[in-house]
């Protein structure tokens, strides 16, 4: 189930885009996820303690993307409830919920708010343990900023979860209209620092340009290799 698509648009947008089947499949998975989280919490709560194994079970079954989406929806829907911590409420606000209350209420996890809050905190810790780059590691977002020649951070949402690691997130921008400030085009051409793959992305696929102080040593070495001019060769001999 981890690979099942978490549909990001509303049902009305899905109709306009001819993607109602995708919306419906994702909506059903959201409901199943909310139900299973509630059940897992009930099974793993003993002696006033919530066993962290329930988090591992849900992440293995549904993945971070859907679990985060369902939990963020739950906290946003119950924002009035003071039993959710301030930090978790602020975390939940980062997720955009496209549908109206009529659909969102159907995948709200209705376990006890204190237990859901603890579950959310453990999910966030598990995510942080992955060591992925985020907006806090990037230069402040600025539409006038040029990306060309910069190391960019690819959003985890763009990648399959099995590819979530720093090596797959860092890309050297080599050009494209989307790399230019205030350009109408979106295309960004880039080279992956992890494996050297060259491909096209859109500007919105990136979180931003990585701060120099956040660049790991392995990336600095790879960047130097990519930016060092290669001597021309002929028949295997250096000219």
Image (spheres, rainbow, N blue to C red):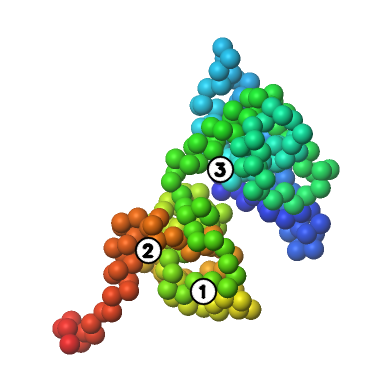
Q: Are marks 1 and 2 in contact (CB under 8 Å)?
A: no
- Give the CA distance from mark 3 to mark 2: 24 Å
Q: Which mark is residue 135?
A: none
Look at mark 3 in the image and give the residue it sits on: 64
* Mark closer to the observer (3, 1): 1
Look at the numbered disc 3 and give the secondary structure of its residue: helix
Q: Quadrant of the N terminus?
A: top right
Q: Are marks 3 and 2 in contact (CB under 8 Å)?
A: no
Q: Residues within 10 Å of mark 3 (few under 14, many from 20)?
A: some
Q: Nearer the viewer, residue 148 or 20?
A: 148
Whole-percent x, y for residue 190 in the image: 45, 71
Q: Residue at x 68, y 54 (%)?
A: 8
Farthest residue, direction left: 237
- Give the CA distance from mark 3 to mark 1: 31 Å
Of callouts 1 and 2, the N-terminal one: 1
Whole-percent x, y for residue 149 in the image: 42, 73
Q: Is residue 239 left or right of residue 37?
A: left
The answer to whether residue 168 of the structure is visible from this angle is: yes
Of callouts 3 and 2, the N-terminal one: 3
Q: Residue at x 62, y 51 (%)?
A: 5
Vertical comparison of 159 with 102: above or below: below
Q: Residues within 10 Å of mark 2 (few under 14, many from 20)?
A: many
Look at the numbered disc 1 and give the secondary structure of its residue: loop
Q: Residue at x 52, y 78 (%)?
A: 176
Whole-percent x, y for residue 140 in the image: 54, 61
Look at mark 1 in the image and give the residue it sits on: 146
When asked about the image quadrant of residue 169, the answer is bottom left
Of callouts 3 and 1, the N-terminal one: 3
Vertical comparison of 218 with 143: above or below: above
* Mark closer to the observer (1, 2): 1
Q: Which mark is residue 193?
A: 2
């Amino acid at each position: 189930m981890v690979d099942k698509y978490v549909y990001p648009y509303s049902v009305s947008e899905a109709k306009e885009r001819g993607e109602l089947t995708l919306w419906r499949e994702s909506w059903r998975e959201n409901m199943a996820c909310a139900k299973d989280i509630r059940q897992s919490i009930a099974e793993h709560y003993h002696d006033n303690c919530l066993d962290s194994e329930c988090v591992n079970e849900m992440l293995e079954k549904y993945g971070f993307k859907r679990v985060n989406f369902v939990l963020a929806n739950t906290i946003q829907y119950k924002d009035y409830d003071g039993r959710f911590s301030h930090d978790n409420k602020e975390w939940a606000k980062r997720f955009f919920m496209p549908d109206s209350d009529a659909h969102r209420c159907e995948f709200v996890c209705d376990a006890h708010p204190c237990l859901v809050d603890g579950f959310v905190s453990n999910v966030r810790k598990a995510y942080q343990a992955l060591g992925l780059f985020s907006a806090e590691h990037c230069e402040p977002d600025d539409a006038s900023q040029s990306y060309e020649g910069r190391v960019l951070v690819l959003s985890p949402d763009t990648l399959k979860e099995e590819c979530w690691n720093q090596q797959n997130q860092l890309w050297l921008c080599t050009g494209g209209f989307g790399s230019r400030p205030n350009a109408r085009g979106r295309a960004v051409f880039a080279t992956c620092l992890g494996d050297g793959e060259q491909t096209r992305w859109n500007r919105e696929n990136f979180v931003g340009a990585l701060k120099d102080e956040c660049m790991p040593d392995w990336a600095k070495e790879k960047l130097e290799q990519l930016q060092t001019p290669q001597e021309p060769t002929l028949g295997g001999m250096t000219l």
